[in-house]
Image (cartoon, rainbow, N blue to C red):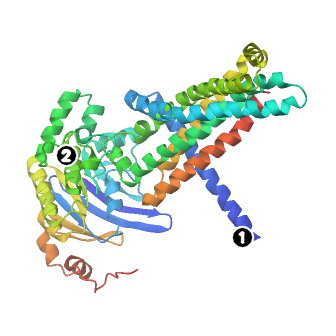
């Protein structure tokens, strides 16, 4: 479904990705773990074509997206829905207009139909009666739910989650985990989540990959990752400050 | 010395690079103006932001500029008995120069800053990335409406400034110094040509495009959180104002030759 091969990217003198490889099968929930600054966000931004790699390729359903022009890229992006870390809701639009953004803009749906779809999608993420609120009136957890509703509004095949549980209290974080599982079950989407929250990773992942210094150093099921022999992965999943990963570099 | 040349070189490279990026953005923006979907609602919203909301401060600036212009030139001209020329000075200064430039500077400070801050905030909160993932071209969605609003509203504001400035001059010349109303209007039209007004409008149009483009560029490519947005906003205003003042000279030299 999605294949990342030999992906390298530098920003100025700083090399963030060094030949990363990742393969995600259709319908699978892949979780990419890694510390802050390990290149997780940069990786996910390449998968949806927001960044162009220096080297390597990203293919979605067998099609290389790295060389696509603007039009081709926008077509491919229709397959994707993305939930941003801070939800990235448009401040100037209310909740339902955010959710139906694509429907109103590109599919030329009438406002009343678009609103009805928005209400339905909001219900799927467990929200009701918030349609006319502005994003600034929502709590962090609600924003993420609205962001998710917006990402699923046009029924994409692939969902990307950028640190979905970061900044939420443990109960809200778990509610978001449940939602991610539900999305996979109900919409049978392929999903890629980047996170450093191991509790979340174990719960939502079919497979987990660890990104370290711009490379994927290990991939396996949650069980395999828990029992890994790799000292770097072991240090990360146990959350220890002592080990091969230096806290201050 | 080597260090100085190095610094200068780095500055020139950076300047050329940025100029190139602004011109690319200009090319992209003008191309997208002609392509559907047309964001009529956003254009209207931006026209209100740039035009209608700038109106109060533009009006106040215009009336006082016209007044002080009349006051100063009257005092000066009186020394050699040319008081009757005050109306012509006010009319020519307002239409050719002060109308477009003052309006430009005010809009740069008000609307330009708002554009840079808004787009900058959208950049750092990933809203621009979100637009991309929703397959909406952010240049089309965000920059084109602001650019159109600048192109249309700046000339409109400049014309209002011209008229209100001349009225300000009238109030001082006729009201304070007792020149007759007929003389004032006659003197206003005696030396004013339609070209003065047209070229003033043309300059305003150019300034409007520059303000929108520069401010959007600064906001769109801002980085580094709240601090970055602040920097983008400041530099949008400074750069727009500088561009207006510098290009004004060259445009005037070219148009009014």
Where's residue B206, x and y in %? Answer: 62, 33
Is residue A179 or residue B117 the one in the foreground?
B117
Residue that appears at 36% across and 52% down: B126
Quadrant for the C terminus of chain B, please: top right
In the image, what residue occupies the spot 8% across and 51% down? A185
Contact between marks 1 and 2 (CB within 8 A): the answer is no
User: Which mark is drawn over residue B235?
Assistant: none
Q: Residues within 10 Å of mark 2 (few under 14, many from 20)?
A: many
Q: Which residue is mark 1?
A: B3
Residue B223's place in the image compared with A197, above or below, is above
Q: Is residue A63 left or right of residue B124?
A: left
Q: Residues within 10 Å of mark 1 (few under 14, many from 20)?
A: few
**Residue B164 percent coordinates (x, y):** 62, 26
The one nearer the camera, A111 or B47, is B47
Residue A169 in the image: x percent, y percent?
A: 18, 65
* Badge nearest the viewer, 1 or 2: 2
**Chain under label 2?**
A
**In the picture provided, is B143 more to the left or to the right than B93?**
left
- Residue B37 lies, with reference to residue A94, above or below; the image says above
Q: Please name whichever residue, B96 or A112, is drawn nearer the observer in this view of the structure.
A: B96
Q: Looking at the picture, does residue B141 appear above or below residue A18?
A: above
Distance from Cα at disc 1 to Cα at disc 2: 55 Å
Q: Nearer the viewer, residue A147 or B109?
A: B109
Place of residue B48 in the rendered image (x, y in percent of width and height, measured from the top left): 45, 31
Quadrant including the N terminus of chain B? bottom right
Does any portion of residue B197 appear in the rendered image?
yes
- Residue A65 visible within the image: no
Task: State the mark number for residue A149.
Answer: 2
């Amino acid at each position: 479904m999605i294949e990342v091969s030999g992906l390298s990217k530098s920003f100025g003198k700083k090399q963030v990705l060094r030949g990363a490889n990742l393969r995600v099968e259709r319908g699978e929930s892949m979780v990419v773990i890694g510390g802050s600054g390990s290149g997780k966000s940069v990786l996910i931004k390449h998968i949806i074509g927001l960044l162009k790699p220096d080297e390597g390729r990203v293919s979605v359903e067998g099609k290389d997206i790295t060389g696509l022009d603007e039009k081709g890229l926008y077509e491919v992006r229709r397959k994707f829905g993305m939930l941003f870390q801070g939800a990235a809701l448009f401040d100037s639009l209310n909740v339902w207009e955010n959710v139906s953004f694509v429907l109103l803009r590109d599919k030329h749906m009438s406002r009343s139909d678009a609103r009805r779809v928005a209400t339905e999608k909001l219900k799927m993420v467990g929200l009701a009666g918030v349609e006319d609120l502005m994003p600034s009136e929502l709590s962090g957890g609600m924003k993420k739910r609205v962001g998710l509703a917006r990402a699923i509004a046009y029924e994409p095949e692939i969902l990307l989650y950028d640190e979905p549980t970061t900044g939420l209290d443990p109960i809200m974080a778990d509610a978001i985990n449940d939602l991610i599982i539900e999305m996979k079950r109900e919409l049978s989407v392929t999903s890629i989540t980047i996170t450093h929250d191991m509790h979340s990773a174990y719960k939502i992942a079919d497979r987990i990959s660890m990104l370290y210094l711009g490379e994927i150093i290990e991939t396996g099921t949650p069980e395999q990752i828990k029992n890994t022999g790799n000292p770097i992965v072991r240090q990360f999943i146990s959350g220890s400050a002592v080990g091969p990963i230096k806290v201050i570099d | 010395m080597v260090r100085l040349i190095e610094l200068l070189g780095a500055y020139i490279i950076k300047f050329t690079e940025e100029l190139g990026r602004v011109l690319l953005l200009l090319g992209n923006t003008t191309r997208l103006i002609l392509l559907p979907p047309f964001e009529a609602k956003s254009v209207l919203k931006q026209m209100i932001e740039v035009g209608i909301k700038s109106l109060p401060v533009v009006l106040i600036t215009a009336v006082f500029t016209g007044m002080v212009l009349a006051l100063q030139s009257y005092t000066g001209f009186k020394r050699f008995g040319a008081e009757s020329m005050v109306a012509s000075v006010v009319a020519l200064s307002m239409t050719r120069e002060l109308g477009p430039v003052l309006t430009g500077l005010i809009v740069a400070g008000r609307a330009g800053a708002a554009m840079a801050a808004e787009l900058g905030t959208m950049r750092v909160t990933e809203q621009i990335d979100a637009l991309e993932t929703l397959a909406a071209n952010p240049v089309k969605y965000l920059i084109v409406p602001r650019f159109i609003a600048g192109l249309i509203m700046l000339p409109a504001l400049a014309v209002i400034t011209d008229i209100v400035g001349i009225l300000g001059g009238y109030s001082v010349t006729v009201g304070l110094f007792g020149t007759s109303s007929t003389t004032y209007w006659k003197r206003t039209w005696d030396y004013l040509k339609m070209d003065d007004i047209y070229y003033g409008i043309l300059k305003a149009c150019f300034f409007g495009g520059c303000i929108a483009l520069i401010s959007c560029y600064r906001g769109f490519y801002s980085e580094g959180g709240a601090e970055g947005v602040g920097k983008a906003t400041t530099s949008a205003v400074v750069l727009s104002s500088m561009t207006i003042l510098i290009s004004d000279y060259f445009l005037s030299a070219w148009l009014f030759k």
